[in-house]
Amino acid sequence: MLLLFLWTLRLVDGLNELFSAIAGIIPVKYNGSNVNIIESAVSNATVTNIFWCVFILAIGLLGIFTIAAIIKNMIVSHKNTAQIVGKFFLSLLGTMAMLSVVILGILIVNSTLSLVAEIFKLNTTTKLSSALFDACVGDWLNGYSVSEIDVATLSVHDIFGDYNTAVFGIWPTGWKGNGMVNPDTFLYLPAFIASLALLIALFIAVINLAKRVYEIVFMYLVLPFSMSTIPLDDGARFKNWRETFISKLLLAYGSLFSVNIFVLLLPVISKMQISGISGFGNALFLLMMIVGGALVIPAGQSLFARLFGNADDMHVGGGLMSSLFYGSRMVTALTLGTTKKAMRGMFGLGRKIAGHARQGNKGKGGSGGNDSNKPQVPNFTYTYSTMGDSSGYDIGGNNENNT
């Protein structure tokens, strides 16, 4: 159990590093230099060329929408033509201005995100895996503490130490107490369940952040299209674009706050005890608090999106878990149904083979040449007549003439 717990903690550390890189907190390698993943994706030469091609296409659409708005105004007479033409030039110049705002907004958001990450590291440098390990330890031994170890490099022997043996030195009888923690007070099952819940929560958060990179590039490229509809809809489509783009930019802040708040509160929660209940009850209390804190990690993204934009598309966490849950149920049902049909077929085939075997044994039973059990061929007698003669033949082998 402890070995599985250590493996899960290493995966947690790996996902935490991916989280920081995809969110833009730490740089990534690109062509031999350290770059921010979102800034390098938006400023890529190919992406820039595609943006200008889309901008030229949007100018043509802007002219079509302007003509449509003029025709519509001639019918309903809500505006004058000068206002519509003014919105044409406003949309054309506004696209260029928004291009600068988008680039500047990405730079500001990424810089602020790195600053917030550094603020959370002022009072603690404990990794996520170490904080979770410390919460499940129980009692430290021999002067060790969580600040002096790296869980990712430890083995079970390093943590628990040696054990006493009996029966020719094979059967373990107890621990020698020369390890880092007390094996008798370690919370084995809560540690494994909590680490698994944290692993799933980080996995969902990383998927949302990876999707965010593509969505920001997508929003950047479709900006001219949203601006081209201003003469026709008075900027309604551009308003939707603006709210969605802001929510995508600020999405990483929700994950950053939720992960760091979880790391900050975990040592405090692990030291709490409920008086009047057993040790199992306190272990269950710690497990619930850890799992609940882990679920805040993907929920923090949607919460931040609701505060600063819209969160209608933030269903990756719940949708993924629901898909996995119902998918596993479907696979299980199909597997059980197929197994049931296969077992029915095998039992039916077995019964047929047994029936044939019983019939064969009956045919071979009794005295050696006794054919009383064999099926008898019935005697069929028929009569036919010809001109002046009447003869009877017995098909069963008895030649009798019947007139």
Image (cartoon, rainbow, N blue to C red):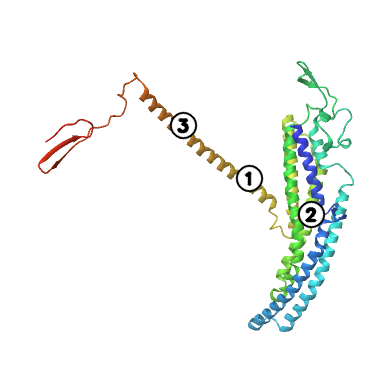
> Does label 2 or label 1 sit earlier along the sequence?
2
**Which residue is tagged 2?**
252
Mark 1 neighbour density, 10 Å: few (under 14) some (14–19) many (20 or more): few
Task: Measure how far apart labels 3 and 1 are at the Cα level.
Answer: 37 Å
> Does label 3 or label 1 sit earlier along the sequence?
1
Q: Measured from the top left, where is residue 230 in percent x and y? A: 72, 74
Above/below status of 362 relative to 215: above
Mark 3 neighbour density, 10 Å: few (under 14) some (14–19) many (20 or more): few
Mark 2 neighbour density, 10 Å: few (under 14) some (14–19) many (20 or more): many
Secondary structure beneath dot 2 equals helix
Q: Is residue 100 visible?
A: yes
Secondary structure beneath dot 1 equals helix
Q: Measured from the top left, where is residue 316 in percent x and y? A: 69, 52
* Residue type, label 2: Ala
How many dots with numbers? 3
Task: Measure how far apart labels 3 and 2 are at the Cα level.
Answer: 62 Å
**Which residue is tagged 1?**
325
User: Residue visible at 64% across and 81% down?
Assistant: 76
**Which residue is tagged 3?**
350
User: Residue visible at 51% across and 38% down?
Assistant: 342
Task: Measure how far apart labels 2 and 1 are at the Cα level.
Answer: 26 Å
User: Residue visible at 72% across and 37% down?
Assistant: 193
